[in-house]
Amino acid sequence: MIIRTEKLTKRYLHKNGEVFALKDISLSIEKGSFVTITGPSGAGKTTLLLALGGLIRPSSGEILFNTTPLHHATDNELAGFRLNNVGFVMQNFALVPYLTAAENIMVPLSLQGKPKDIQRQAALKLLEETGLSDRVDHLPRELSSGQQQRVAIARALINNPSVLLADEPTGNLDPSLSEEILNLLKKLNREKGITVILVTHSQLAESFGSHMIRINQGRLNMNQAPLL
């Protein structure tokens, strides 16, 4: 087991009272699994993903990564946790427009202060693994949408994370490119043993999951098994 939550709750204050984005979410995620999180718009999918990645704090409840409690962690501890354990892939790619493909991938290692030659060597290896060895020095605007998402995935992998969190990674892609990216994520999951947790509206993306979490109005669906 790599992640466990117990009665995870996230609430926000609204002029009309409290709004619960998450309510008493208890679940476990096994190491090496490919998990999809689905549900209607506003169900709490992205909130759950961000909480699991240590990007937002729960209002109450517990989040354990292996045996480390994230719900009690300081800001610095959470930053270190994310840097060393989690890769993030977003719908809009979030690439730096004036950096090349290789330079975008190198950003996390640059933040760690790693030598430039080590950064570039690691980036080139990931570009090869993601089928972009001929796009090393291309800027994002010179890449297709599918290629940009591959660069974003490579950047998420540069720190050898144990968990890859993806928020609608195929949302801006056509069906053909969507399947291409999903196949890449599945390959990384199988060959590298990376735990993938993916938020999606897509039935195609959901079908790639080995386990599924379905939530509505911040709660697990009634037929949702608590353990994955």
Image (cartoon, rainbow, N blue to C red):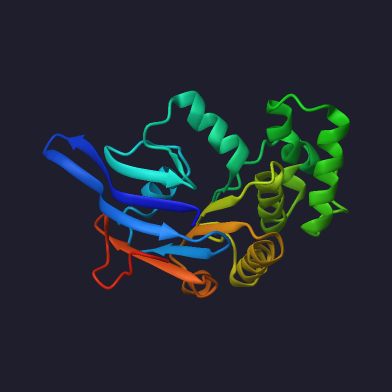
Residue sitting nearer the eye, 97 or 194: 194
The residue that appears at 31% across and 62% down in the rendered structure is 215
Q: Quadrant of the C terminus?
A: bottom left
User: Where residue 76 sits: x, y (%)?
Assistant: 50, 24
Q: Is residue 50 left or right of residue 106?
A: left
The residue that appears at 68% across and 48% down in the rendered structure is 157
Q: Is residue 131 above or below residue 152?
A: below
User: Where residue 131 sits: x, y (%)?
Assistant: 80, 60
The answer to whether one can see residue 138 in this image is no
User: Where residue 5 sits: x, y (%)?
Assistant: 36, 50
Q: Is residue 15 above or below residue 165?
A: above
Query: How many marks do you count on the picture?
Result: 0
Q: Is residue 29 above or below residue 72?
A: below
The residue that appears at 33% across and 43% down in the rendered structure is 62
The residue that appears at 54% across and 64% down in the rendered structure is 33
The answer to whether one can see residue 219 in this image is yes
User: Where residue 124 sits: x, y (%)?
Assistant: 85, 46
Q: Is residue 78 left or right of residue 185?
A: left
- Tell which residue pokes out farthest to the front in this image: 67
Q: Is residue 95 left or right of residue 62?
A: right
